[in-house]
Amino acid sequence: MVVEPVVYGASERPPRGDYRRAGADYTCAQDYAAYTARDHDTYRRLYARQEALLPGLACDEFIAALPSLGAKDRIPRFEEVNERLSRATGWEIVTVPGLIPEVPFFTLLANRKFPVTDWIRTPQEFDYIVEPDVFHDLFGHVPLLFNPAFADYVQRYGEGGLKAHQLGACEQLSRLYWYTIEFGLIAQAGGLRAYGAGILSSSGELNYAVTSPEPNRIQLDLQRAMRTRYKIDSYQQTYFVIDSFEQLFGMTAPDFTPLYDRVKNLSDIAANALQAGDKLIQR
Ligand code: HBI
Ligand code: FE
């Protein structure tokens, strides 16, 4: 789940995180002492509920890597996760107070650093939260960084983001992020499975994305995804499907510049629309 870093006017509630803690690169230290027993219990409950939902819905690689997060009954110390993650794929998670601007975000990814928010939602927000908290970022995003092909894709996405920023193509690239890293589906031997963090960390959308007859499911095409608008506060109306993480990595090998040039002159596609040429994927 990604919400644009919003400038909070005086009338709106301030961002959840304390950005005064952050340095120039927007990273800070995980404030482990600040967690209350209630915070750890919220994490334990979220983890237990989501783990029980995974079989038959989450991709094989996610299920295999999840135990690498370590503790289930408390919020893990990020440095504990990093001991395993850095050995697996050379990635490390860094702490951020919340959503950060695009260029610092892309810069971190390009350097194999994944930004993980360190605060956790309140019990009242157990079922839904607008901004990414530590459960969304850690449970949703980090396990697949243990998979080499996916980890390479995320770094290449970060490198592409810095290029996109120079070309004024961030909107197109954020759609690609949304429809892969956040809400992507993958076709596996057992059937369709989720690999996107926004799906994997959601108690309701995980079953919906993989099994509901309502949404469109389309074979991933970069241009099509970059043209497609998305919703940030409801289940997706369209999901894009890949065949493997190696395929996803391979798709992003060529320079995106000609792709941006084409997409910029084409109209946006509504989140629920189908287009001629869409390769529909059946559940
Ligand atoms: N910041 N912490 C954080 N996490 C994200 O996933 C994130 C972000 N800032 C911007 C962003 N995602 C999206 O706009 C990307 O498409 C760039
Ligand atoms: Fe996310």
Image (tube, rainbow, N blue to C red):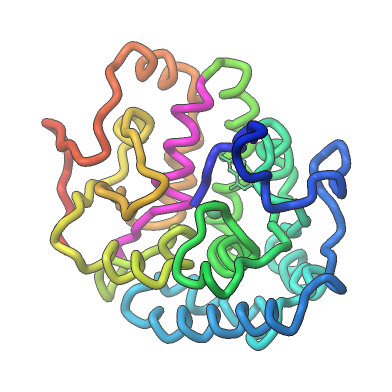
> Where, by quadrant of the figure, is residue 175 drawn?
top left
Is 182 colored magenta in this rendering? Answer: yes
Range shown magenta: 169-187
In the image, residue 195 sits, relative to residue 217, either above or below, namely: below
Q: Out of 56 and 228, give the one closest to the viewer.
A: 228
* Left or right: 259 as drawn, with respect to 25: left
Q: For this rendering, which residue is in front, 52 or 33?
A: 33
- Horizontal relation, residue 166 to residue 140: left or right: right
Which residue is pictured at 15% across the width and 37% down the height? Answer: 274
**How many marks can you see?**
0
Q: Residue 145, can we see it?
A: no
Q: Is residue 210 above or below residue 103?
A: below
Q: Tell me where residue 230 appears, x and y as whole percent.
A: 35, 40
Prevailing secondary structure class for the magenta stretch in the rendered image:
helix
Q: Residue at x 86, y 44 (%)?
A: 20
Q: Is residue 71 magenta?
A: no
Position of residue 187 measured from the top left corner of the image (x, y, whole percent): 29, 62
Q: How far from the left and from the top, in percent, is residue 224?
A: 29, 32
Q: Is residue 95 left or right of residue 21?
A: left
